[in-house]
Image: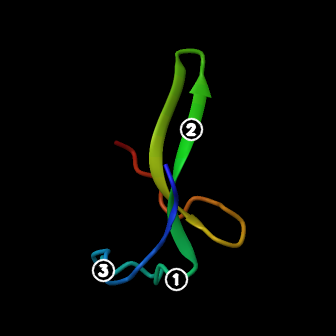
Amino acid sequence: MATKPNDPDDTAQTGDDQSGEGTFETDVSETDDEGTTVRQAKVKEDDLSEVKKDNS
């Protein structure tokens, strides 16, 4: 799956302190003893750290 830049017109504003600038959504894979899970996450462009982890 391709990544896409975060477009403020496409996302709902939640009132968080983070403006969303300099972030994009991408697929993140996590592997453990039970296998590999792939999910979407919002990450910072400069260091690819996750902005907000979704606990779903």
Residue 45 location, x and y as percent?
64, 71
Q: Do the residues labelled 1 and 2 touch (CB within 8 Å)?
A: no
Residue at point 60%, 27% (across, down): 31
Name which of mark 1 and mark 2 comes first in the sequence.
1
**In this figure, which colouring scheme has been used for the structure?**
rainbow
State the image quarter where residue 49 is shown.
bottom right
Q: Distance between the residues labelled 3 and 1?
A: 12 Å
Q: Taking 16 as reference, is 2 left or right?
A: right
Amino acid tagged 1: Glu
Amino acid tagged 3: Gln
Instruction: Identify residue for label 1.
Output: 21
Instruction: Decide: is 37 above or below 26.
Output: above
Crowding around mark 2 (Cα neighbors within 10 Å: few <14, some 14 to 19, many 20+) is: few
Residue 1 location, x and y as percent?
49, 48
Name which of mark 2 and mark 3 comes first in the sequence.
3
Return the residue nearer the eye: 50 or 10.
10
Q: Do the residues labelled 2 and 3 touch (CB within 8 Å)?
A: no
Please identify the residue farthest to the front as the structure is shown: 2
Instruction: Identify residue for label 3.
Output: 13
Helix, strand or loop at mark 1: loop
Return the residue nearer the eye: 32 or 39.
39
Crowding around mark 1 (Cα neighbors within 10 Å: few <14, some 14 to 19, many 20+) is: few
Q: Are marks 3 and 1 in contact (CB under 8 Å)?
A: no
Amino acid tagged 2: Ser
Instruction: Decide: is 22 above or below 56.
Output: below
Residue 7 location, x and y as percent?
41, 79
Instruction: Identify residue for label 2.
Output: 29
Crowding around mark 3 (Cα neighbors within 10 Å: few <14, some 14 to 19, many 20+) is: few
Residue at point 54%, 73% (across, down): 23
Please identify the residue farthest to the top as the structure is shown: 34
